[in-house]
């Protein structure tokens, strides 16, 4: 599970500790969720957000978002699909250059139940709160396009695979594609890991909610590049670093008239395993 921080000095130490295997080592990539398993992660997202309407700048903001995430495997739905409960607490720090406003807030995110196969595919999800159901389409596209689905069988260093999806947004068909590559093997945070690099794009349509008076809609186009350290014996992510560049076209209703907004976001993301426990 994902994700979003800058590559800092700790990375230099991590690189020094890497032990690559170019001798044809083969592994099988699978998640290995079991009932009672608990995983705690910290995600730090740093970057900038620029929102413009015509020639006017609405927001020019720097942000740091620290997310505490806990994943709890509640049960196995059948022999393969795990129900994983996702709870998050967000700590936001913002400074906006436009109006010199600053914010430092803490907010609990909605509880989410994910249904995940051993290949890592999210086959379904649901919010436990009705008020967040309208975000489902955006999140569905993110899980389909932005999460790796592991290939079958044994693979080794140098193996690549590509996941492509057709997306309809604002009546236009577009293609989102992400390519993954087995880069190396490394010892990371006490785990034997496979290092998976990825590079590609996501297309995330924003659909207007019936209850939303602003009728916000549009599309976010994201280019993403990163690296995942996956503990292949235990079956979970240990570390992920990612660079996001988002270009968004969004529209809202204001006083009965549609207003066009251009959104530009750049994020550096670091996602780190903090605790693992099997009940």
Image (cartoon, rainbow, N blue to C red):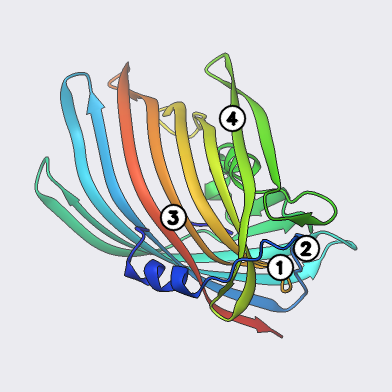
State the separation of the CA atoms marked 4 and 1: 27 Å
State the separation of the CA atoms marked 3 and 2: 27 Å
State the separation of the CA atoms marked 1 and 3: 22 Å
Q: Could you tell me if the residues under marks 2 and 1 are in contact, i.e. CB atoms within 8 Å?
A: yes
Is residue 128 rendered to the left or right of residue 201?
A: right
Badge 1 crowding class, 10 Å Cα cut-off, few under 14, some 14 to 19, many 20 or more, is many
Is residue 64 rendered to the left or right of residue 232?
A: left
Q: Residue at x 21, y 58 (%)?
A: 103
Circle 3: element type: loop
State the separation of the CA atoms marked 2 and 4: 28 Å
Q: Could you tell me if the residues under marks 3 and 2 are in contact, i.e. CB atoms within 8 Å?
A: no
Reading the image, the residue beneath label 2 is 27
Q: Quadrant of the N terminus?
A: bottom right
State the separation of the CA atoms marked 2 and 1: 8 Å
Q: Which residue is drawn at 68% across and 57% down?
A: 114
Q: Nearer the viewer, residue 61 or 256?
A: 61
Reading the image, the residue beneath label 4 is 176
- The extreme right residue here reads 79
Circle 4: element type: strand
The picture places residue 262, in percent across and down from the top left corner, at 31, 26
Q: Quadrant of residue 194?
A: bottom right
């Amino acid at each position: 599970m994902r994700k979003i921080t800058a590559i800092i000095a700790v990375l230099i130490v991590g690189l020094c500790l890497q032990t690559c295997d170019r001798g044809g080592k083969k592994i099988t990539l699978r998640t290995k969720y079991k009932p009672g398993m608990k995983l705690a992660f910290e995600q730090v997202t740093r970057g900038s957000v620029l929102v413009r309407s015509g020639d006017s700048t609405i927001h020019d903001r720097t942000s740091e978002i620290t997310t505490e995430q806990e994943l709890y495997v509640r049960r196995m739905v059948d022999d393969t699909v795990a129900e994983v409960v996702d709870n998050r607490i967000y700590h936001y720090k913002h400074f906006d250059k436009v109006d010199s406003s600053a914010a430092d807030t803490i907010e609990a995110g909605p509880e989410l139940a994910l249904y995940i196969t051993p290949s890592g595919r999210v086959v379904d999800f649901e919010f436990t709160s009705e008020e967040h159901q309208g975000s489902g389409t955006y999140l569905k596209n993110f899980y389909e396009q932005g999460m790796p689905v592991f290939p079958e069988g044994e693979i080794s260093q140098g193996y690549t695979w590509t996941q492509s999806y057709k997306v309809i947004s604002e009546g236009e068909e577009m293609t989102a594609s992400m390519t993954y590559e087995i880069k190396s093997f490394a010892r990371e945070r006490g785990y034997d890991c496979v290092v998976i690099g990825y590079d590609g794009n996501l297309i995330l349509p924003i659909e207007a909610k019936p209850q939303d008076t602003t009728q916000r809609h549009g599309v976010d186009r994201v280019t993403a590049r990163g690296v995942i350290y996956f503990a292949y014996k235990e079956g979970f992510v240990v570390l992920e670093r990612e660079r996001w560049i988002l270009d968004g076209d969004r529209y809202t209703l204001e006083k009965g008239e549609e207003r066009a907004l251009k959104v530009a976001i750049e994020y550096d993301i670091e996602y780190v395993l903090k605790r693992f426990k099997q009940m």
